Amino acid sequence: MKSMLIQFGLFMRFSKLFVLCLLSNLVFSEVGENPNHRKVEYNEISSLLDFATNNARSPFIKYVAKIVIKDEEKEISDLNLWISKDEKVIQQVTISEDGVLDLPVYNQQQSKNTWLNINQPKDTVSISMSFEFNIGDRTEVSYYDLFILLDDFNDFMSEMAGMASWLMSDMDAMKFIFDKPATIEFKTKKKHYRYNTNKDNEIVIDVRRKLFKENPLVKFSISPVGMVPED
């Protein structure tokens, strides 16, 4: 990913949502002598979007791209993003009021020679691309749907890292964060599992892949305010 600056960070929002920032900044290049027109190659972005959108197995994982305004004098209404191919505009990019981008997913052939363009000078905005882990207000979910998101996450990180993926260790546990003491329970044919929060109101559970097939129902005493993949 020569055109991207890759940074990793963890951000917790106490609204039953966990956000893991994957790409904190896309490096746009100026176009010609116009400082208010910059662009970045779109084929790698599209391939990541395609991988995240079409390969995720858990319903509790979502991939989000969002514009971050660095210049306080700028507003969402000042921004214009579009996809171009061979110097022709092929699609406008919709930006929601809270900055979420509706980025299109193209196949490998369609994304050749495509660019993501923006009408802003350097250091005005950045684009964050992130995973959101969210089970909402649910207190009962299937084991497979809950823990397969670790595989989704690991697969995506390997795709992002490419040849360097062998340096990365897979996440094989999930930390659940609560705003007060809580329990997590599930029963299998052989055992009754029960986990209690620690002093920080957290529970860490290692994934047991042999349970994917049996797929017991995981019961939370209260829904968690956050979920964090762990090594």
Image: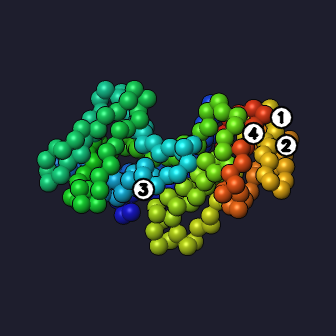
User: Can you identify the residue that label 2 sits on?
Assistant: 196
**Horizontal relation, residue 19 to residue 25: left or right:** right
- Where disc 3 sits, the SS reads helix
Other residues around mark 4 within 10 Å, as few (<14) / some (14–19) / many (≥20): some
Image location of residue 84, percent across then percent down: 20, 48
Please report contact status of discs 1 and 4: CB closer than 8 Å, yes or no: no
User: Can you identify the residue that label 4 sits on?
Assistant: 219
Query: Residue 51 has which mark?
Result: 3
Q: Sequence-wise, which precedes: disc 3 or disc 2?
A: 3
Amino acid under disc 2:
Asn
- Above or below, comparing residue 9 to residue 156 in the picture: above
Disc 3 and disc 2: Cα gap in Å? 35 Å
Residue positioned 83% across, 56% down in the render: 190
Q: Is residue 35 visible?
A: no
Disc 2 and disc 1: Cα gap in Å? 8 Å
Please report contact status of discs 2 and 1: CB closer than 8 Å, yes or no: yes
Q: Is residue 26 visible?
A: yes
Image location of residue 42, percent across then percent down: 30, 54
Q: Sequence-wise, which precedes: disc 2 or disc 1?
A: 1
Disc 4 and disc 2: Cα gap in Å? 12 Å
- Where disc 4 sits, the SS reads strand
Amino acid under disc 1:
Pro
Quarter occupied by the N terminus: bottom left
**Quadrant of the rendered image containing residue 36:** top left
Q: Sequence-wise, which precedes: disc 1 or disc 4?
A: 1
- Above or below, comparing residue 200 to residue 39 in the picture: above
User: Can you identify the residue that label 1 sits on?
Assistant: 181
- Where disc 1 sits, the SS reads loop
Disc 1 and disc 4: Cα gap in Å? 15 Å
Residue positioned 33% across, 49% down in the render: 105
Please report contact status of discs 3 and 4: CB closer than 8 Å, yes or no: no
